[in-house]
Image (tube, rainbow, N blue to C red):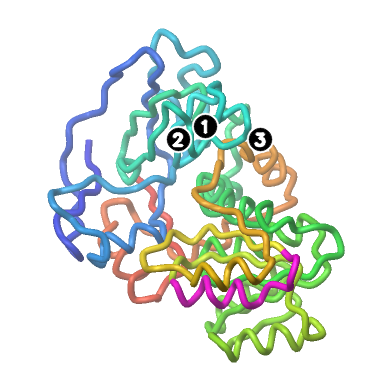
Amino acid sequence: MYGTVLHAPGDIRFEQLPDPRLETPTDAIIRTVAACVCGTDLWVYRGIEPVDRPEPMGHEYVGVVEEVGGDVRTLRPGQFVVGSFAISDNTCGTCRHGYQSRCEHGAFLNTCQAEHIRIPHADGTLVAIGDPPDSRHLADLLALSDVMGTGWYAAICAEVRPGSTVAVVGDGAVGLCAVLAARELGAARIIAMSRNPARQRLALSFGATDVVAERGCEGVAIVRDLTGGTGADSVMECVGTAESLAQALRSTRPGGNLGVVGIPHTDGVDCAELISSTVGVRGGPAPVRRFLPDLIHRVRTDRIDPGRVFDLTLPLSRVADAYRAMDERRAVKALLLP
């Protein structure tokens, strides 16, 4: 098969790789129907995370089951599946508490920008959707494997409630999906923080009621002004820098809640500021598997359309162009078709 390999910062290649094979009885092999590039892939692409040797890439995918191991019980060849970026058995104590991204036997996928993928713990990681999806739902279902599931988790962590006021820091695919999640959970006012006109328009179509282009202290001041001086009830941090985390914390009212799903690559906020803020904080890698059945239903009943975050579609063989487009902010998110 062919798949994506990062050889050095900025050096993405689509090259021939060994076909994946069943390695344990709980494995499944799927044929990739669609994959994509994630904003978190850019950290290693840019060299912010070290690249010591060639690494396969990709953790977002939908596909068709081609082969299953002898212990797989819920899947069969020919089924269309959506999976999480985090492998999980969905049976351990941590999974039973709803945190499949911290499964006691789990790991994170990194081989999904390829024509075929081996999925360990297939029963616990993949969800079969029944009838094959309409082509109009393909991008929406692909978004569930990470960005929509992560945006949803951000809203859950921030305890978005009906009638609440929400702010979203970050206008990438996760931030835009967090806006959509806040709308679905009943927020009355959703403040999207974005400086990009195209992303602002998409945020508004997803349910944002206000857009704040300013950043840092100026952005915080505007959010506080919009909320009567107190700050938002719920804030979602969807970037992963010290600056965005500080902006999110300071935009949250005392006693409010902050959901943090941006993967940090710099030092965070001062602990004294965090403690004195009286803000509740929760986050981390999203347990997407927990949300998949509900989100799949919302997509297939046309409640949500997160696939609109994809504004560039390319053949999988042009994956290097997809990385460049996202790195240069010419695309929010690139969809890849084998």
- Callout 3: SS: helix
- Answer with left or right where residue 217 lies relative to residue 228: left
| Residue 63 image label | 2
Of callouts 2 and 1, which one flags the residue occurring earlier in the amino acid sequence?
2
Neighbours of disc 1 within 10 Å: few (<14), some (14-19), many (20+) = many
The amino acid type of the residue labelled 1 equals Val
Give the residue at x 72% y 80%.
Answer: 210
| Residue 293 image label | 3
Image coords of residue 164 (percent x, y): 82, 66
Residue closer to the observer: 317 or 285: 285
The amino acid type of the residue labelled 2 equals Gly
Position of the C terminus by quadrant: top left
The amino acid type of the residue labelled 3 equals Pro
Per the picture, the main secondary structure of the magenta-coloured stretch is helix
Marks 2 and 1 close (CB-CB < 8 Å):
yes
Query: Magenta stretch: residue 283 in it?
Result: no
Looking at the image, is mark 3 or mark 2 nearer the viewer?
3
Image coords of residue 247 (percent x, y): 56, 77
Quadrant in the rendering for residue 11: bottom left
Give the residue at x 49% y 24%.
Answer: 89
- Callout 2: SS: strand
Distance from disc 3 to disc 2, alpha carbons, whole Å, reads 16 Å
Farthest residue in the top direction? 70
Quadrant in the rendering for residue 168: bottom right
Give the residue at x 45% y 72%.
Answer: 242
Distance from disc 2 to disc 1, alpha carbons, whole Å, reads 6 Å
Give the magenta-colored segment's residue range: 242-256
Image coords of residue 243 (percent x, y): 47, 77
Image coords of residue 274 (percent x, y): 58, 68
| Residue 81 image label | 1
Of callouts 3 and 2, which one flags the residue occurring earlier in the amino acid sequence?
2
Quadrant in the rendering for residue 37: bottom left
